[in-house]
Image (tube, grey):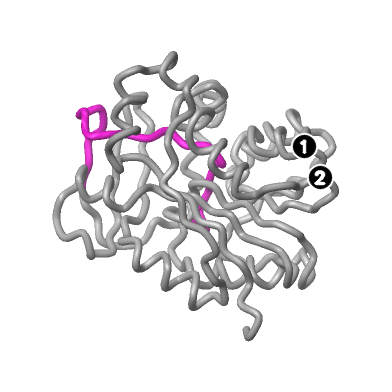
Amino acid sequence: MAGRVSSADRFHVDSSGIGQTDDVTDSVGPDPQYELFADEFLDHAREGLYNAHYDRPACLRLLGEIAGHTVLDVACGPGLYAEELVRRGARVIGLDQSPRMVQLCRQRVPSGEFRVHDLADRLHWLPDDSVDLVLFALGLEYVDDRTSTLRELRRVLRPDGALVLSRLHPTGDWLRHGGSYFDVRIVEETWSRGWQVRYWLAPLERTCEELHEAGFLIERLVEPRPTAEAAHVDRDRYERLLREPIGFLAIRALPAPWR
C-alpha cells in the first residue's frame, strides 16, 4: 500500500475499541507491513464485511464495464480483486510490496501478471498510456509521497481511461482518532487480530488536492453503503455503516486533458 504495501482488501477498525492507537510523526516507511499476516488477511478478507460486502462492490461499480480492458491492480493484496476482474473479462496486471501477497495473487489468478513493487519507485516496467483502468483500493494511506505515486499512475493510464481508488473515510478517521480533522499525520494501530499497521490520516481536501496535482479530475465520489448480504455477516456494523461515515469512500478520477 501506500507506496508501501497494500492489499486490495483491508480490515477496518471502528470506534468500538478493538484497536489501540498511538500518533507518530515520521513516515510510513518501506517495510511490507502485510507480509507478516498475508495468509491470515486472505482468510479474513475473502468474505469479510468491509472487504467483500462494502469496498469491493463499490469499486467494481465505479470501474464499470471492464471486459477486454487492461486493468492495473495497484496494491493488489492476495488477489481477491484480481480474481473478480479476470472473471469479468479483464486482463490484469498487479503489484504489491509484499512478496507473499504477490505469491498468493499468482496462485489465485494464474492468467494475471503480478510483481513485487514499491510504489515509492517509478513503474519503469510499464510504458506511457499502457493500461485502460487503474484500481487502487485501500492503499493510498500507506504511501508517503502520494502525489508522485498518483502522477505515475496517470502516466501509465490511457487518456480515455480512469482511476478508481478507495480510502478510509476521513470523517470516520477523525471520529476515531480525535485531534484536528485537518492535520495530516501518521498513526499506528494494533488491530484485533494483533496485526500492527501504520498509515496516514488526511482530510478529504488533501486527497482531492493530491489528485489535482497529479493531473486528475474527479468524476465521481461515493460514500458506499454495505450490501444487504453484510447484515448476515455482522448486523451491528452493517447498521452503523448505513447511518455513519465510519467506513470508506471511493473516487473515480479521469486524466485531465490539459496535463
Helix, strand or loop status at disc 2:
loop
Helix, strand or loop status at disc 1:
loop
Q: Earlier in the sequence, mark 1 or mark 2?
A: 2
Residue 60 lies, with reference to residue 30, above or below; the image says above
Residue 41 lies, with reference to residue 30, above or below; the image says above
**As drawn, which residue projects farthest toward the bottom?**
258
Q: Is 255 colored magenta in this rendering?
A: no
Across and down, in percent, residue 49 comes to 45, 25
Q: Is 12 colored magenta in this rendering?
A: yes
Residue at (56% x, 41% y) in the render:
8
Q: Is residue 25 left or right of residue 211?
A: left
Q: Residues within 10 Å of mark 1 (few under 14, many from 20)?
A: some
What distance separates the C-alpha of mark 1 from that of mark 2?
6 Å
The C terminus is located in which quarter?
bottom right
Q: Are marks 1 and 2 in contact (CB under 8 Å)?
A: yes
- The amino acid marked with disc number 2 is Ala
| Residue named by callout 2 | 67
Residue at (64% x, 70% y) in the render:
154
Q: Is residue 139 left or right of residue 133?
A: left
| Residue named by callout 1 | 88
Residue at (49% x, 20% y) in the render:
229
- The amino acid marked with disc number 1 is Arg
Q: Is residue 237 left or right of residue 96?
A: left
**As drawn, which residue projects farthest toward the left?**
179
Residue range of the region highlighted in magenta in the rendering: 1-22
Across and down, in percent, residue 147 comes to 49, 71
